Amino acid sequence: MSKLRRKGKSAIVWVVMGLLVLGLGGFGVTSFSGGSTEIGRVGETKLTADDYARGLRQQLQAMSQQAGQHVSMAQAQAMGLPNAILAQLVTAAALEEQARVIGISVGDDRVVSSIADAPAFRSPSGRFDRTAYSEVLRRQGLTEAQFEAEVRVDEARLMLQRAVTGGVVAPGAMVDQTAKWLLETRDLSWRELRADDLPEPITDPDEGALEAWHQANADRFTAPEIRKLTYVWVTPEMMAPEVELDETALRETYDRNIAEYQQPERRMVSRLIMPSQEAAEKGKADIEAGEIPFEALVLQRGLQVDDAYLGEMTREQLGAAGDAVFELDQPGVVGPIETNLGPALYQMNAILDPVDIPFDEARDSLRQEAAMDRAERSIEARADEFEEMLAAGMTLEEIAADTPLELGQLEWIADQDPAEGSIAGYEAFREQAETVGQDDFPHMARLDDGGIFALRLDEIVPPTLKPFAEVREEVLADWRRSETQRLLLAMADEERVQAAAALDPAALAEGVSAAQTTVGQQPVAPVVPVDAPQDDWTAETGLTRDGWIEDLPAEVLASAFTIAAPGEIEVADAPGRVFLVRLDAVHDADLDQDTGQQVRDAVSARLDETLQADLFDYYNRAVQTRAGVQLNQNAINAVNTQVQ
């Protein structure tokens, strides 16, 4: 409802409330005893349990829809959702309190206009619909008087917010500098140094050095934690081959899914309600003349294309428009046709042929589907029975011997890809496998395909350093990679120093001295590379900061944008690879071009919003500090318990 009330308004304060979970420490937070519907207050402005509970339910519903599964209150608390909702309420209450103190309010005209402009209260014709208004408020548990009072308060908050943040814009010089930084392009060349470029091959270390390397880099040779699990499970797919089906069961499945096998001819249709017969006739004429497409006419009416889409419709479902739409043998527009909402234009988008698959043709597919369905229902019916067996003290092994559940054992390693067909492929199993303790009793849990499982943690094998003898070859290979990288970096740095000396001879002595000291943690003698032919370098032009070069690590391009002046060389240290990167040219951005102006406008808007958000944050913190924030944690906990 908060989004609904504020649609179309300056949204900075609400964006800030969504992005900033304001810390309440230092704002005078205390506990107090209040009424049953009050969970806190800012100054004299109350925070009500109804607002808090409504916000929690709305966010839980939205998160569940996005996740495609139910999000519990426990999960929401783990993500910090209640604190975020509470922070938003405190922020809103602080603004309301400040508006009350300084006497800001709005008149009835502003409230009426705000409600009339809300899209949720409009009819398909775009007008305010009182029936829709009453129905939406009823679903939210609000009376019209309550909602209109909240709108009045919201408008006062927005007025205050505009006064605080209005006129705050980023300096033009900051905007230009940022846009130029983003759009600047560079020309560069690079050359990769490889092991073959080293003047001498790498000599393997003795056993003592290898063993020391093994100990010094123990994290690379440590086996991860292993959780040894025993489990029982059954899925509909596992039980389906044993399910016996008769003709009646197949027929029931066919009838239950008749829409998949028997469908009349349909049309994919969109409908646009017009304000008058004259407007409808003119719209139809413009479409037929090719002056405007149907979709553009929808947008002109203040709607989105999806708002006009009816979906797959039969002749009967279209009512008075059925005959006209079904007479079309290709996509087109018909109308105007009078409906109970007014004259309408109908666009037929596609023809869907009738579906007629008799029972005999569907029998084979029905058999598998019916078997899976019956197996799933059988599992559902017996799930409580299996749970009672566990509660009675039966072990997983005993349950597997007396029921259809299959027994299995698994050495679970977090982040390891499960074997195909393994129970570890189920998210529900993985979640339990990661969190189950050795003192936890097994219990039945659901799988997303209708199956069930229970597991037991038998043993935890902690991360263990693998014995040197077992991983000697891995240790040697790792040492070689590291040593090769170290020597290549030394060679690259020597060449970089020489290039710098060519540009500034005074830097040679200092650069060579630095190159002779250390690279990484080990001393390195200077390596003087053979001069590389110029054609060993690969050039690329017009690269941006967010660009990429095929088959090259990101460190190459990143290094090019750290170089101060053309002609200078930088070393790019990428995983397992070493590059010399030379800056050839810097091209300043032209902000007068279309792209430059668009980026500048976007940067300006982003910086404006950032400055406004920061200013609002400081202001709101000051208001909370001055007014004082009080919270009744017992009342908050009670709401959290009730909202599930």
Image: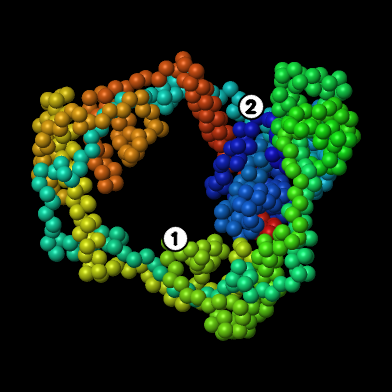
Q: Eyeballing the image, is 389 above or below 171?
A: below
Q: Eyeballing the image, is 68 above or below 489?
A: below
- Percent position of residue 68, x then y: 63, 53
Tell me which corner region of the image, top left, top right, bottom left or bottom right, holds residue 36.
bottom right
Outermost residue toward the top in this view: 592
- Looking at the image, which residue is at 74% across and 43% down? 353
Q: Nearer the viewer, residue 121 or 14?
A: 121
* Amino acid type, callout 1: Asp
Q: Eyeballing the image, is 577 above or below 225?
A: above
The number of numbered discs placed on residues in the rendered structure image is 2
Q: Secondary structure at mark 2?
A: helix
- Percent position of residue 566, x then y: 25, 23
Q: Nearer the viewer, residue 469 or 405?
A: 405
Residue 117: in sight, yes or no?
A: no
Q: Earlier in the sequence, mark 2 or mark 1?
A: 2
Packing grade of label 2 (10 A; few <14, some 14-19, many >=20) is: few
Q: Which mark is residue 417?
A: 1
Q: CA distance from mark 2 to mark 1?
A: 55 Å
Q: Which residue is mark 2?
A: 163
Q: Nearer the viewer, residue 580 or 167?
A: 580
Q: Nearer the viewer, residue 175 or 22?
A: 175
- Percent position of residue 166, x then y: 61, 25
Query: In the rendered image, which quarter contains the C terminus?
Result: bottom right
The reply, left or right, for residue 433 in relation to residue 634 is left
* Mark in the foreground, 2 or 1: 1
